[in-house]
Image: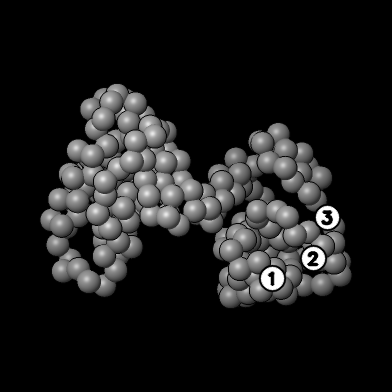
Amino acid sequence: MRQALERGLDRNGFDSTAVATAAAARGIDDHDIALVDLGLPDGDGVELCRELRAAYAERPIIVVTGRHDELDVIDALDAGADDYVTKPFSLAVLTARIRRHLDRSSPLTVVGALRIDRRGRRADLAGDPLNLTSREFDLLSALALRSGETVTKNELMSSVWDSHWSKSTHTLAVHVGTLRSKLQRDDESPTIVTVPRLGYRLDAVPSNR
């Protein structure tokens, strides 16, 4: 399974290193994400997650295991794991999760011609800076991190406005409208799509304005 997973990840553009033990995993310090099984021959995968989280605070950890028990999931997440995938799983699903966690852990998000630097709180479209307010930047970042997916109104309000909102979505709609106007520079610009009764989705290349 380990060797098959390594081959599959390599075919999908990842530079992966497969090891059989916790001891070998501790010696790897130059990778961007860790996939950890809980059943290891020389220790507990939960403890390895805890050690990796302490050593690399920002490196995403995905547990890949055959254990389905709820307590195992809780233990792994409490130990610092960011995600939990149980066998059997498809390579497509796993690679999608890997890419999502890598996008979130990186300060840079790219969606088509849109480039967002979350650490520097800057965004540009086809190389031209976008003049965004703080709320607009947070809203665009939240949509960009899940580009191609529908983000619900409640999720956006909670992540952008936190607890300081009155449960009215009018403010959200106003900010989305302003963002749309700032993104409409040419036919290749990303667009914010309204998903009726649910929320909004950022598409990399609009099919129809």
Foreground mark, 3 or 2?
Answer: 2
User: Residue 134 placed where, x, y %?
Assistant: 28, 58
Q: Is residue 131 left or right of residue 102?
A: left
Q: Is residue 99 left or right of residue 165?
A: right
Question: How far apart, in angstroms, are the residues tagged by discs 1 and 3?
Answer: 18 Å
- Tag 1: amino acid: Ala
Q: Is residue 50 visible?
A: yes
Question: How far apart, in angstroms, are the residues tagged by discs 2 and 1?
Answer: 10 Å
- Tag 3: amino acid: Val
Q: Residues within 10 Å of mark 2 (few under 14, many from 20)?
A: few
Q: Earlier in the sequence, mark 1 or mark 3?
A: 3
Which residue sits at x=23%, y=39%? 182
Q: Give the residue pinned by disc 1.
A: 55
Question: How far apart, in angstroms, are the residues tagged by discs 3 and 2?
Answer: 10 Å
Q: Residues within 10 Å of mark 3 (few under 14, many from 20)?
A: some
The residue closer to the viewer here, 153 or 105, is 105
Q: Secondary structure at mark 3?
A: loop
Q: Earlier in the sequence, mark 2 or mark 1?
A: 2
Q: Earlier in the sequence, mark 3 or mark 2?
A: 3
Q: Which mark is residue 26?
A: 2
The residue closer to the viewer here, 116 or 176, is 116
Q: Is residue 56 left or right of residue 107?
A: right
